[in-house]
Image (cartoon, grey):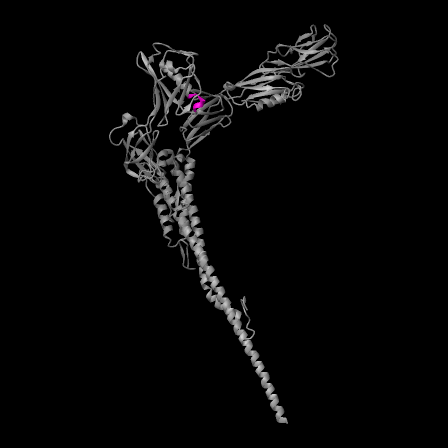
Amino acid sequence: MSGLTSVDGLISGLDTTEIIDSIMAVEGRSVTLLEARRARYSNQVLSYQSMTAKLLAVKADADALARSSTFDARSSTSSDTDILTVSAASSAPVGSYDLTVTAIARSHQVASQGFVDSDTATVGTGTLGLTVDGDTTTVTIDTSNNTLEGLRDAINLAGTDVKATIINDGGNTYKYRLLLTSAATGTDNGISITNNLSGGATPVLTSNSITAPAADSGNTYVGTATAAGAYAGTSGKTYTVEFVAGGGLGVATYKVSEDGGTTWGTTQTLNDLTIDVYDDLNSTDLGAQMTFGAGAFGAGDEFVMRAFVPTVQTAQDAAITMGSGSGAINITSSSNRIADALPGLTVDLRSADASETVTVEVSHDTASITTRVTGLISNFNAAIDYITANSSYDSTTGTAGLFLGDTTMMAIQRDLRNAIFSTVTSTETYDSLFSLGMSVSDRASLSINTTTLGTALDEGYDDVAKIFQISGESTNNKISFLTASSDTVETTTGYDVDITQAATRGKITGSSIDDPAITPFVIDATNNQIIVTVDGKQSQILQLTQATYNSGADLARDIQTTINNDSYLSGKEVSVTFVDEGATGYFEIRSEKYGASSSITIEDPANGAYSDLGLTGGTTVTGVDVAGTINGEAATGSGQVLNAASGNDNTDGISLLVTLTSSDLGAGAEGSLTLVKGVGAKLAESLFMWTEPTVGILKMREDTAEDQIESVDNSITRAQAVLATKRARLVAQFTAMEQALAMMQTQSSFLGIQLAALMNQSSSSSSI
């Protein structure tokens, strides 16, 4: 009977399956309760996850508003984007600028004379040198690539700053031309060409040229026609010579067109086999000539000759004027992207119009701040509403919300409200979000008046920033607050800042030399080279301007400019001064960087200047980092930045910019620093505790619920196993009962048969 799950009451007449199911239903109530508990835990997990998502939305806005970069952002506009567009980084100064674009930067473009085709006509073999901004690339042409296309490909594969292409100018003949374009714009990037090709139709790229005349296929004349003269035009021309009357010298007549036959010059007699080719009625003689061989011409004979000018486009710098008064500033740039005229402002030039002034406005990006603040309020309401909706009790259905009585959710509500309603003491103008236009409805929902917020941003932008950020104020203007973190403890009474060592810059100080103002200093080919290593980065061999200097300051300025313009130094700059001591003086080269990595070392090349400058054997000093304490707690210096040590009880996360010099230092603290955390910073700190993805409180609650689900699942599995065993036992018991009843029924039938047989025997005996 093993494996039976039900049994019919065939003998007993009982519905044994229903009886077993009823018994098991009562026994299975524990599983039903466990499943209900599991469902509640599952809903808790989902609710904690939803709560975390809503709090993270609040935190994202709070984090953004707590960052200085959010308030440092700039918005920029151009009054005419067809002329120029602008973009502004956080360092761009707020203001309005009037710009006039008088020229846009252009690349240098030159084109060869025309060729009959691009793939078979040979251009000769040898080399073609291309120089751009002092860098020369030599392109080698041999018999494997001596066509116009081969030359183009060789130039492009050479990695030069010149790009080559072949254009079809649409002419009737000689229409394929090699076009060279400088990869960069500006006058410094003009193309210089050294053409050492020979043995073919060498491309002419540096002077005007004239192609051989092309004879019409229907011409009667069978002699030769060649180009002659020197074309002096400034743009290309196509000349058509047509014979009006046939014959030879002194008989044939001809006329010339420069526009393909629309207009013609006068009809002239062919008195010489070399003729000046130009339209004598509508143009001027530019030096083009055509020479014919002996022979007779036919009326209608036609010859086409083309004159080419190589310069397609002159290299040109961009030019803009800032302002319109007598002190207007003229700015030139080799590029149409000007990124160094004003700090943080990038101007992209599109076109030039000297008659139009374009106004560029740079302002605080108040629109993004408004969006963040309204987003913060909206997400705050969503988080509070979610907690409220899940903390209610429905008396009609007797259903309690998942958060009803949940102390975690009560604590979240408390922290959120405490932070967003908090006051800030770092500004007198605004002290809370209420002063920026926030209000609370009768349903405890928050809203923000964007008009009030906009006015506050316009009138007190920096003060509005302090409402959200961590702000610090120092009593010493040479100690500036940079940053703090969530680990930093606020202080309104102030942390003492004690500086024990001011940051310095690395330098080299030379020995005394004659003052150039008294004894002029000559820089020539024997002493015009220097090599300098700035902050560990070595320059190339630098060339000083060869000149006679009558001022130590002028010479120092030239040395400084030469060093700072070196591309090898990658922006590592120096300052160079001449210290005048009367009849003598000395040079000093100082790194612009502060700290222990700041250093200057020199090396004299073959034609070095250092010895004459008094710098050979000069005194070298390496810079030092700032050192000191904040609130008596440890701090480390990096250049002029003093960073509180990680793990400090109060000052962890603080960074200060210290511009004090050694002469500013004295006994005791050099200043006091107060720190106030704004609404954004407080919200972000509070929410971090709740939403941290590994050890945050909500994550821990979620993990606890997950553990409880696992525990309940195990309990359900065990209970179901017990119930299965119990059902099997009941089935077996009822089966045994039916079997016993069946046996009794069989025995009863047997006894009945036996009794009937005995009774039959008794009746038979009586009859006898």
Q: Is residue 653 left or right of residue 16?
A: left
**566 in the magenta segment:** yes
Q: Nearer the viewer, residue 370 or 551?
A: 551
Q: Nearer the viewer, residue 231 or 504?
A: 504
**102 in the magenta segment:** no
What is the x, y in percent for residue 309? 59, 15
In the displayed orientation, state which residue is furthest to the left.
Answer: 667
What is the x, y in percent for residue 696? 39, 46
What is the x, y in percent for residue 526? 42, 12
What is the x, y in percent for residue 300? 73, 13
- The rendered magenta stretch, by its main secondary structure, is classed as helix
Q: Is residue 500 left or right of residue 171?
A: left
Q: Is residue 378 visible?
A: no
| Range of magenta residues | 564-569
From this view, report whether residue 221 is shown above or below residue 118. above
From this view, report whether residue 178 is shown above or below residue 48. above
Q: Is residue 26 visible?
A: yes
Q: Is residue 568 left or right of residue 249?
A: left
From this view, report whether residue 521 is shown above or below residue 5. above
Q: Quadrant of the N terminus?
A: bottom right
